[in-house]
Image (cartoon, helix red, strand yellow):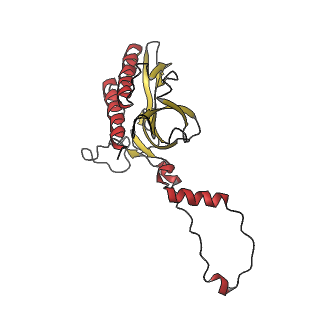
């Protein structure tokens, strides 16, 4: 999918409009800007709406507060970006876009727990392929932190801060009644699972190997991509209060 500079500027305005609404922003200052083919949150956003966060890759970025549970005590934050690659002086090709959701009070370090991504395919030997070969595009990623509850967090903290055990010799009698700590489940592999956000399996049967599959596509137009942003942002803002 290609777009002109003028079209991208209008597209940026549409994204800004939905962000202004779901973030309940009273300040008319733009929340996103277009710089060198990248649409991202503007550093000039009102300080009441933004904060710095760290992605699961260790990169610092800006996130906007969602008014959940309310504008004065936000606990959820959203970050976004959209990237285009210039193919000529006036036209660019869609590369990727996505949003990341964070959880944390203003006084705490916010933790990334969920992301939605859409990456365009590339051509290799005339064949269209997507990252991850069979991975869904667009797709959701559930980050590991989303699976750790308060009890597991305390157990993990205890394990990290507990002193090293003393080496002792135990008889059969003394070991028979001793409790053995169970290791916490490791869900780090879940970050490698792509959960399709648009799968047409009911309309096009997939044999499990064919690529691209019915769960892989790219935006057909800027209007379609704008609707996707609008729906995705509204959806998470409606689901998170539950």
- Residue 219 in view (yes/no): no
Rendering coords of residue 228 (x, y %): 33, 32
Residue ranking furthest to the front: 72
The quadrant where residue 118 appears = top left
Horizontally, is 202 left or right of 107 in the view? left
Rendering coords of residue 223 (x, y %): 31, 24
- Residue sitting at x 67%, y 62%: 162
- Residue sitting at x 39%, y 26%: 25
Q: In this view of the protein, which residue sits in the foreground, 134 or 4?
A: 4
- Residue sitting at x 52%, y 38%: 106
Q: In this view of the protein, which residue sits in the foreground, 121 or 154?
A: 154
Q: In this view of the protein, which residue sits in the foreground, 14 or 123?
A: 14
**Residue 184, above or below 52:** below
The quadrant where residue 1 appears = top left
Residue ranking furthest to the bottom: 173
**Residue 181, above or below 29:** below
Rendering coords of residue 49 (x, y %): 46, 29
Rendering coords of residue 103 (x, y %): 48, 43
């Amino acid at each position: 999918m290609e777009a002109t500079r003028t079209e991208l500027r209008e597209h940026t305005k549409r994204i800004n409009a939905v962000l202004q609404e779901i973030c309940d922003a009273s300040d008319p200052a733009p929340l996103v800007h277009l710089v060198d083919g990248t649409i991202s949150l503007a550093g000039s956003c009102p300080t009441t709406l933004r904060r710095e966060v760290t992605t699961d890759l260790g990169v610092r970025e800006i996130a906007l507060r969602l008014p959940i549970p309310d504008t004065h005590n936000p606990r959820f934050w959203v970050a976004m970006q959209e990237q285009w690659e210039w193919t000529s002086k006036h036209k660019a090709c869609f590369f990727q876009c996505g949003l990341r959701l964070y959880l944390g009070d203003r006084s705490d370090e916010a933790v990334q727990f969920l992301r939605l991504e859409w990456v365009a395919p590339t051509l290799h030997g005339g064949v269209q392929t997507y990252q991850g070969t069979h991975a869904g595009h667009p797709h959701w990623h559930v980050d590991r932190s989303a699976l750790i509850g308060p009890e597991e967090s305390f157990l993990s903290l205890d394990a990290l801060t507990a002193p090293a055990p003393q080496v002792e010799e135990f008889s059969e009698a003394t070991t028979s009644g001793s409790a053995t700590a169970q290791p916490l489940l490791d869900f780090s592999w879940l970050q490698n699972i792509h959960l399709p956000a648009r799968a047409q399996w009911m309309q096009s049967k997939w044999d499990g190997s064919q690529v691209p599959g019915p769960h892989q596509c790219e935006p057909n137009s800027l209007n379609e991509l704008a609707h996707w942003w609008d729906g995705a942002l509204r959806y998470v803002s409606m689901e998170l209060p539950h």
